[in-house]
Amino acid sequence: MRHLGALNTPKDLQDIRRLIAQKAQPWYGTFVILRQNSHDAPSYSPHPTDTLIRGTAPHHPKENYATLFNDAAAAYALALDWRLTGDTTRGGAAARILNAWARHLHHIGGTSDKYLASGLYGYQLAIAAETLRDFPAWSPADQKTLKDMLLHVFVPMNKEFLHTHNHASIDHYWANWDLATLNALMAIGIYTDHPDLYRLAKGYFLHGQGNGALHQAAWKLYPQEHLAQWQEAGRDQGHTLMGIGLAGTLCQMAWIQGDDLFAADQNRLLAAARYVARYNSGMSVPYTPYHNSDVTQPYIAPKGRGLLRPIWALYEGHYMRLLHQNAPEITSIYEKNPIEGGGGQYGPNSGGFDQLGYGSLLFLTAHALEK
């Protein structure tokens, strides 16, 4: 695997450091937002637990997964800050968070939502760790402890969900469940140098049967409009945005590793991102009633329409500024939130932490450097 191999190359990060030093926008403005985020505090204290619970029922343990989505957001923010500034107090804080979870977490439980936890927080911890991987004060022994935890706690659940879908029909779980799982397998594969996990995620995205695979997630093409209907569009827009964000993160990791999933099936993901951006900008889109084994969704869902999430700078940066594609819907929705924050700046609940964020700091360099 290529290292650094999470969301940016070393050259990307060098260019971003230069743009911050020049106080160029939106890089400098996003860095200010990073520093203003309470998760990017050198004094941040982790709250590890032996057993993480997501999803509960009467007479079952209470949920506690908010501890991990906050700590993962902090580990990433602190690691990114160290990577860009050399601030060793922040690097040390990121290492403390990752070490604490590596030493304490042994089990993830709850309802079927436990598989969302193993996906979302597996990929976030692994990306934070990859960002921090050569921090001088983070010992090889501590890194091995984290790698072992990721491989023995998260990966078995990721594989189980992908292979069995919790013993449900293959089309029962929404696209975001598969995509969270694929992100975890890919990110953990990169950080732990397990190409088998990386290939599993990549192969499933391209050829899998569940709703997170590209052809099921962007399931209905409208060739004349260059749009593709997203699998969750008839459910609600919060989960639709979550899925599009996770798909972008997956493709970005693969891009850093030298694989172009963004271009798969003639830019099918771009067509889906345009569809979601257009509808969530207040414009109309075509809609075909969606059916699976459990539900029929005759209309596109207005619930959550226009919700703000830090997902669009990645698409703007890759398709428009790097490849010079034309997707005005994406440019328009990105420009409504041109400074993207991170976890905790989009609400206190889990939906505000599903993406690591700071895209306007990380993904727009090609266009700036051309100028």
Image (spheres, grey):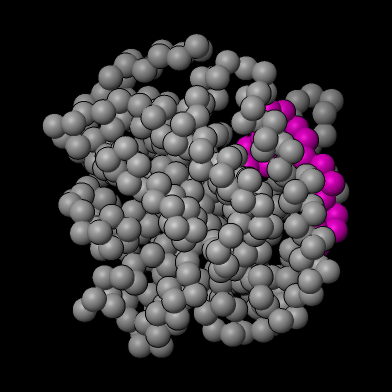
Residue 19 falls within the magenta-colored stretch: no
As drawn, is 344 to the left or to the right of 67? left
Residue extending furthest toward the bottom: 22
**On-image quarter of the N terminus:** bottom right
Q: Quadrant of residue 292?
A: top left
Q: Is residue 30 found left or right of 47 in the rendered image?
A: left
- For the question of whether residue 123 can be seen, the reply is no
Q: Position of residue 142 (x, y in %)?
A: 81, 68
Q: Is residue 104 magenta?
A: yes
Residue 94 appears in the rendering: yes
Location of residue 58 by image quarter: top right
Q: In what quadrant of the picture does the C terminus appear?
A: bottom left
Q: Which residues are magenta?
A: 99-119
Direction from residue 57 to residue 309 in the image, left or right: left
Q: Going 57% across and 67% down the picture, which residue do you hit?
A: 3
Please, is residue 324 above or below residue 185 in the view? below
Please tell me which residue lies in front, 89 or 203.
203
